[in-house]
Amino acid sequence: VEIGTAIVDSTGNWSFTPSTDLAEGAHAIAISQKDAAGNESPKTTPVNFTVDSVPPTAAPTLDNINDDVAPVTGSIGEGDTTNDVRPELTGTGEAGNSISIYDNG
């Protein structure tokens, strides 16, 4: 489906921004060019990408911070002290997403 056209400038460059939003989901964008006589080149190999502009619907959870360095091991609670300088953090989020972890906010 053709979604628009662009004019090549005198230096051989062109630019195009869709006039309407691309739908959420998968897209495969290919281009071709036409000369003044209407002859059209073959289409390029499509560039595949996904539009995902909707943020996750649920907040992730931080279910546990685990100390695995003796002498005291196990879950670290709010206000606890640990000698583990690299405790394991675990929780949940939406499948396929990445979780960003922040220290001090």
Image: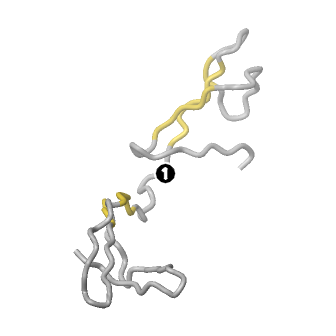
Q: Residue at x 73, y 21 (%)?
A: 84
Q: Is residue 49 above or below residue 60?
A: below
Q: Is residue 93 above or below residue 55?
A: above
Going by the image, does 23 lie left or right of 103? left
Outermost residue to the top: 71
> For residue 80, what is the image quadrant?
top right
Tell me where residue 103 appears, x and y as whole percent.
72, 43
Outermost residue to the bottom: 36
Find disc 1 in the rendering and name its residue. 59
Q: Residue at x 51, y 42 (%)?
A: 61
Q: Nearer the viewer, residue 87 or 33?
A: 33
Tell me where residue 34 appears, x and y as whole percent.
30, 82
Q: Residue at x 61, y 24 (%)?
A: 66
> For residue 54, what is the image quadrant?
bottom left
Q: Nearer the viewer, residue 22 or 38?
A: 38
> For residue 38, what is the image quadrant?
bottom left
Question: Residue 25: in sight, yes or no?
Answer: no
Q: Is residue 76 above or below residue 2?
A: above
Q: Identity of the amino acid at label 1? A: Ala
Q: Nearer the viewer, residue 81 or 28?
A: 28
Structure colour scheme = secondary structure
Q: Quadrant of the N terminus?
A: bottom left
Question: Residue 60: in sight, yes or no?
Answer: yes
Q: Residue at x 41, y 46 (%)?
A: 94
Going by the image, does 43 lie left or right of 86? left
Tell me where residue 56 appears, x and y as whole percent.
43, 56
Q: Nearer the viewer, residue 49 or 43?
A: 43
Disc 1: CA contacts within 10 A as few (<14), some (14-19) or many (>=20):
few
Tell me where residue 65 appears, x and y as whole percent.
61, 29
Q: Secondary structure at mark 1?
A: loop
